[in-house]
Structure formats: C-alpha cells, structure tokens
Amino acid sequence: MFEQLHPRIAAAILELCAVPEPDVGACTAMLRTEAGEPVRSALAALEARWGSFPAEGLRMLPGVDSRAWIEALLRFAPVAAARLEGMRIPAAVIEATLADIGAQLHWHRRTHGGFGLDTAWWTTLHLSGSLYRLGRLQFHLHRDTESGPWTVGLHIPEDGALDAGSVDASLRLAATFLAEHFPAHRIDHAYCDSWLLDPHLADALPNSNMAAFSARFTNVELRDEPGDALYFTFRVPADAEISTLPRDSSLQRVVLERIENGGSWRVGKGLAPWPMPVG
C-alpha cells in the first residue's frame, strides 16, 4: 500500500474508483510516489476499522489533510475490493460501491472549482466493509448504538431519479444481499437521515418522487441544517449568494423561496421497519 505504484496498477485503481477525467492527473501523481507519513497514518486508520461496522466516517486525524485522505482512499481501495471479493460480494456491487469515491471527487470539483474531497469522511465508510451500493440506493450496516441493535442507513446517490420502482428494486436487492452476506446480523430497523425528510418539501411538492420516498419513514426527528438543501440541490456552499442560483426546476424554486421567506431547511432522521415494505 505504501510503495510507488506501477502506471498500470495506478490506472487500474483510478478505474476501480471511477476517478473523473479532470482529477486523473493529480491522482496518478499521488500514486506514482511513495506514501508519506500522513497517508500512512490514514491507511492505518482504514485498516484498523475494516470489518468493524463503524456508525460514522473518519473525520479527523492529526496531520492528515484532504489530499492525504484522497491518496489513502485510492491506495486502500484495491485492498478493500480484494477482501470484498473474498467475502463473495458480487463484482458489480464492489464496482458500484467504490465508484462513489470518484463521484465525490466530481462533486467537490463542481462545488469548489478544484481538486479536493471535503467528503473524505463519508467515503471512508465505503472502505470499511459496511456500506454497499445496491441498485439505486446505498445501504450502511452498523449498530444503532455501541451495544444496541443492528440497523441499516439508507443513502441516496445523486445520479438518477428517485422513482418508486427504482427504490423498491433497490430495497429488494438489499434485503436479499444483507440476509445472504450478513446472516448473523439481525437487523432491527432501517433509517434515513436527509434534508429530503423535512416535511416542508413534501408539503410543497406533494406529488414528487421525493415526497413519496420520505413517506416511507416515520417518527422523523428534525434538526436545523440550513446548508444541506443548498448543497445537495445546487452543489454550492451554505453561504452562497442565493440570488445567483438557477430556478429552472420546481425543486430549485421551492428551496430558494423558503430561504427568501425567512425559513430554514432542516434535516430529518426517520425510521422504517426492516425489510422495508415495497409496493
């Protein structure tokens, strides 16, 4: 994991992680040199957490900046892929799961205009053996608390429609996948933690796919996170000047109008039984 990598190996890693073209040069340069101490520290943390089903991503390590995290994620990806293959995880699931590393690089560039990864903490979960892309959704298996029941967190990649058929198909895949590969982990419930569960969104767009998705969850607990709606709708920072943002879709207009009217978007955490009901 630490050595300078041959160009063919480096290229294979970038393909595995679906690194977007604008970031290929920077990522290749990282892998063509020996890993420095910050990268080694991040790799050690990833190794230590493998198979532990962490509830949260790794956010901070002394001396490890965003670029070191990117290099560590890339170097650890083939290790994780080999271990998942050894667990008989299908190749298509491994590829879909690790491709989110490249997707996060893409979204960082779109948000900030350059190379980086402000969601490195999130992508550490993809390299822990606990999070999987199964159809439309991602599923994160972990304990609800340190010694509590097992739960599954649902996450929504930003690469397609959230129609009921796609969600149902994903839920069916996940129920079968988790029962087959993790039979000892008796899952108590599922949850989703997202700004899409703010009830204002369903009230404003009652016939939308987002409203139908949020209706799958109950006992929603809300907290103020005013930046999430801006970030995920427009891929801009929370302090962006909203007068410059587009209003081409009904969703964009709803998000901006609420802010302009003095409202604040919230994030909701809602619960659902597992396996989740499908239509």
Image (spheres, helix red, strand yellow):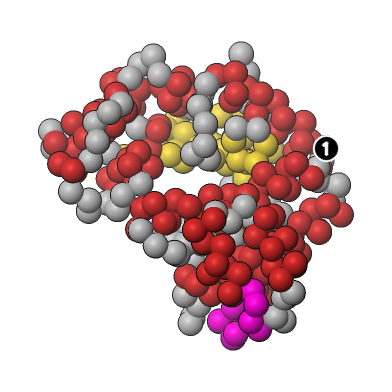
Q: Residue at x 35, y 46 (%)?
A: 235
Residue 65 position within the rendered picture, expressed as x and y whole percent measured from the top left: 47, 75
Name which residue type carries label 1: Glu
Q: Secondary structure at mark 1?
A: helix
**Quadrant that contains the C terminus:** top right
| Residue 263 counted in the magenta span | no
Please name the residue shown 33% across and 42% down the image.
234
| Left or right placement of residue 255 versus residue 59 in this view | left
The tally of labels here is 1
Q: Residue 151: image x %, image y %?
A: 63, 42
Inspect this view and state whether residue 197 appears.
yes
Above-or-below relation of 221 to 23:
above
Magenta includes 35?
A: yes
Placement of 249 over or under 224, stated as above or below = above
Q: Magenta residues, as a range?
A: 31-39
Give residue 100's position: percent from left, percent from top.
Answer: 58, 49
Query: Of 199 and 6, which appears nearest the observer?
Result: 6
Residue 1 at x, y percent in the picture: 73, 75
Lateral position of residue 254 relative to residue 186, left or right = left
